[in-house]
Image (spheres, helix red, strand yellow):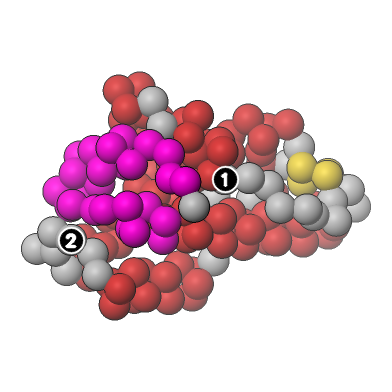
Amino acid sequence: MKISGVKKFEKLFRTVGSMDVDKNDIVRLNDFINKAIYRLLETGMKRAKENGRDVVWYSDLPITQGFESNIEEFRQIDEELDLSEILETIAGLPPLPLEIGEGIEKELPNIAGGITIALIKSFKVINPTKKNPQTEDWNQVTRIFETLL
């Protein structure tokens, strides 16, 4: 699997969490982002259906205040790192039974960036001195996100 932007992601992890990651972590991040986005979209589809629509709007996604804050933090950091284009590729939309609104497609890289910021912060909450996430750290953070999303 070809990984794009490893150096930029390494810088993002250092900037947000003073953490060192390697190529294997970026592969894990890719998988993590896609699973999290799919869970957000599943909830969005339920809300759209409940409101009698066949198009999922950005407002249908369960974007909490904290998550919105992480998205905004990513936007600010992205001005320097320019990760949006890479995240747009990583955060591909899976085939879904409902149409995805333009707002979601446009915001998908920022959503993926917000997920990444939240992930990095979660590593630091679990272990504030952690410098390099290991498999168990990834498993713990993944379980937390699966519980919340």
- Kindly report the secondary structure that dominates the magenta region of the rendered protein: helix
Q: Position of residue 135 (x, y in %)?
A: 30, 73
Query: Which of the two labelled residues, at mark 2 and mark 1, occupies the earlier sequence position?
Result: 1
Q: Is residue 133 above or below residue 55?
A: below
Q: Amino acid at mark 2?
A: Asn
Span of residues in magenta:
2-28
On the picture, is 54 further left or further right than 101? right
Q: Residue furthest left?
A: 129
The answer to whether marks 2 and 1 mark residues whose Cβ atoms lie closer than 8 Å is: no
Q: Quadrant of the C terminus?
A: bottom right
Q: Is residue 5 above or below residue 117?
A: above
Residue at left offset 32%, top offset 52%: 23
Identify the residue under disc 1.
Answer: 91
Q: Which mark is residue 132?
A: 2
Residue at left offset 30%, top offset 23%: 80
Per the image, label 1 sits on a secondary structure element best described as loop
Q: Amino acid at mark 1?
A: Ala
Task: Say if residue 111 shows up in the picture.
Answer: no
Label 1 Cα crowd, 10 Å radius (few <14 / some 14-19 / many 20+): many
Task: Say if residue 5 shows up in the picture.
Answer: yes
Queried whether the magenta region covers residue 109, the answer comes back as no
* Residue 24 image-quadrant placement: bottom left
Q: Is residue 29 above or below residue 101?
A: below
Q: Position of residue 50 (x, y in %)?
A: 83, 59
In the image, 58 versus 13, the foreground residue is 13
